[in-house]
Image (tube, rainbow, N blue to C red):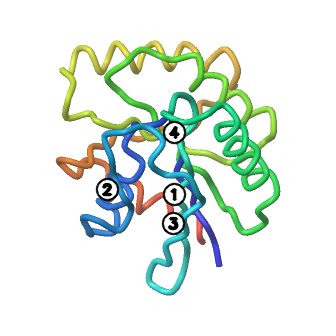
Amino acid sequence: MPEFAFIGRSNVGKSSLINTLVARKKLAKTSGTPGKTQLINHFLINEEWYLVDLPGYGYAKTSKSNRASWEKMISTYLLNRENLISTFILIDSRIEPQKVDQEFLTWMGENELSFVIAFTKTDKITKTKLAGNLKLWKEFLQKYWEELPLSLLTSAKTKRGKDDVLNVIEDLMR
């Protein structure tokens, strides 16, 4: 069955967005502590497709060897999973572009892997600051992509972008 993966820096809101998409508060475990998700978690949706919660990249309260192990597990999954249709890369809209996010997006592009950017936590930022951060992201992306990757604005709290994410998944399954 088709799979759609969700990844981003630790504490970007992956599990919260997943819970919003499936309208269940505790399907994916959430935590204020970075690095809570340590395995690749598959959630079967409507007996038709899988939503996949990947461990966060970047900072986590764990050893360097654990982080290295997660990175190997994640890259193996992303590069070799035949039924992976696309990956949603979650980026915290409240902060300016971070090197770890830029490097991950560049790696995805270099490996020609399908992805959609989902800017999270849009309810926690002013419209002006959000517009400024999105402009910085656009400037970064234009350096490497002729056609900009699809990006969505989301908020697990207000459910902003929920239908947009689900519509993208539906379109990609056609």
The image shows residue 58 at horizontal and vertical percentages of: 56, 29
Q: Which residue is found at the position 69% from the left and 48% from the top? A: 74
Q: Which secondary structure, mark 1? A: strand
* Residue behind mark 4: 8
Badge 4 or badge 2: first in the primary sequence? 4
Quadrant where the C terminus sits is bottom right
Badge 4 or badge 1: first in the primary sequence? 4
Q: Which secondary structure, mark 4? A: strand
Badge 2 or badge 3: first in the primary sequence? 3
* Residue behind mark 3: 51
Task: Assess disc 1: are there few (<14), some (14-19) or many (≥20) residues with their C-alpha within 10 Å of its C-alpha.
Answer: many
* C-alpha gap between disc 4 and disc 1: 10 Å
* Amino acid type, residue under disc 3 in the picture: Leu
Residue 104, quarter of the rendered image: top right
Task: Assess disc 4: are there few (<14), some (14-19) or many (≥20) residues with their C-alpha within 10 Å of its C-alpha.
Answer: many
**How many numbered circles does the render carry?**
4
Foreground tag (1 vs 2): 1
Task: Assess disc 2: are there few (<14), some (14-19) or many (≥20) residues with their C-alpha within 10 Å of its C-alpha.
Answer: many
Q: Which residue is found at the position 41% from the left and 62% from the top? A: 166
Is mark 1 in CB contact (under 8 Å) with mark 3?
yes
Q: Nearer the viewer, residue 69 or 163?
A: 69
* Amino acid type, residue under disc 4 in the picture: Gly
Q: Which residue is found at the position 70% from the left and 27% from the top? A: 106
Task: Assess disc 3: are there few (<14), some (14-19) or many (≥20) residues with their C-alpha within 10 Å of its C-alpha.
Answer: many
* C-alpha gap between disc 1 and disc 3: 7 Å
* Residue behind mark 1: 53
Badge 4 or badge 3: first in the primary sequence? 4
Is mark 1 in CB contact (under 8 Å) with mark 2?
no
* C-alpha gap between disc 2 and disc 3: 14 Å
Up-down relation of residue 55 to residue 141 (above or below): below
Q: Which residue is found at the position 45% from the left and 33% from the top? A: 91
